[in-house]
Amino acid sequence: MWDSIYIEQFCENQLSLEVIDFTPSIYVADNTISAICKCLPNLQELIVVYKRTINKCIIQIFQLQNLVKLDLSCCFCISQLSYQKAVSYLKTVKLKYLSLAFAKISDADLFKLLKCNQNIRCLKIPGTCISNKTLNMICKNLILLECLTLSSCPGISDSGLTGEFENYSDSLTPTPLSNLKYLKELNLNQNSSITNEGCVKAIRFPKLEKLFLHNCGRLVLSEEFKMEIKKQNPRLHSFNPHF
């Protein structure tokens, strides 16, 4: 409690602050984050991880017009409704780094958020309900991506990787993962619906250096498969490294 009071008072007297990083050990209340966002409109980096005390402040966070880095990893108590309200009033459109690990954001709101932030270089959204449709939009629009983490995303399958959909719609332009020409790191760990065929078709990058394919139930990591992946990714030097 005292952490929150002190932090809020400190920020009120440091209006030029551009970076705030709340370590997991610091207690911070929902209304404190909201107050900080209001008094520091020029904030560029905000890191709030492993907090079970925040929820509605996401609405105020998404009002920060100069934010370029946002990490809300494992903030499990931010509800889907709060994300929905925050996205509906979204003013944060300059993000270059975004981590929403295990966020309860809906696929529709994630789609809207990402489409408004096409300069993202690093995107970490493991454990979310992202769909193949949203992944397709990422492949089409977020072409500056260098790092993409999609581990433990049950909605992702070969169709999302390859851009090959059975039923096309006017809003869907089939775009494979390989369209992300600047990608250097890709994490697809623990995705049970992706297969060898989909990975061979999609994982083709001129600059890819790190690839994670741990614990994907339908993947057979044979030597032949590994050799094919390495051949298609000439700069790949870390295939399934341990964390």
Image (spheres, rainbow, N blue to C red):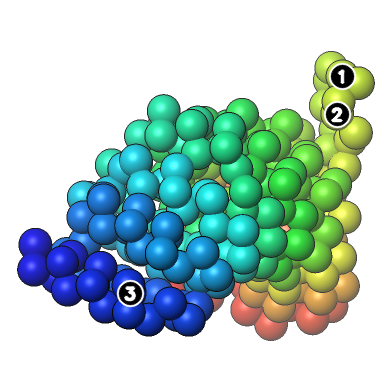
The earlier-in-sequence mark between 3 and 2 is: 3
Return the x and y of residue 186 as percentages of the image width and height. Answer: 65, 63
Q: Residue at x 58, y 65 (%)?
A: 67
The residue closer to the viewer here, 160 or 74, is 74
Label 1 amino acid?
Ser
Residue type (three-letter) at the residue carrying disc 2: Leu
34 relative position to 157: left or right: left
Question: Tag 1, which secondary structure?
Answer: loop
Q: Secondary structure at mark 3?
A: helix
Disc with the residue nearer the chain's start (1 vs 3): 3
Q: Residue 13: which numbered mark, if any?
A: none
Q: Of helix, strand and loop, which one carries label 2?
A: loop
Compared to residue 120, the image places residue 184 above or below, namely below
Residue that mark 2 sits on: 172
From what the image shows, is residue 69 above or below residue 222? below
Real-space Cα separation, disc 1 to disc 3, in angstroms = 48 Å
How many residues crowd mark 3 within 10 Å: few (<14), some (14–19), many (20+)? some
Residue at 31 percent across and 43 percent down: it is 55
Q: Nearer the viewer, residue 73 or 93?
A: 93
Residue 159: x and y, percent? Answer: 76, 34
Q: Quadrant of residue 1?
A: bottom left
Q: Are marks 2 and 1 in contact (CB under 8 Å)?
A: yes
How crowded is the residue under tag 1: few (<14 C-alpha within 10 Å), some, or many (20+)?
A: few
In the picture of the structure, the residue carrying the numbered disc 1 is: 169
The image quadrant that residue 157 belongs to is top right
**Residue 171's spot in the image, x, y percent?**
86, 25
Residue count near mark 2 (Cα–Cα under 10 Å), binned few <14, some 14–19, many ≥20: some
> Hey, what amino acid is under mark 3?
Cys
Residue 209: image quadrant is: bottom right
Disc 3 designates what residue? 11
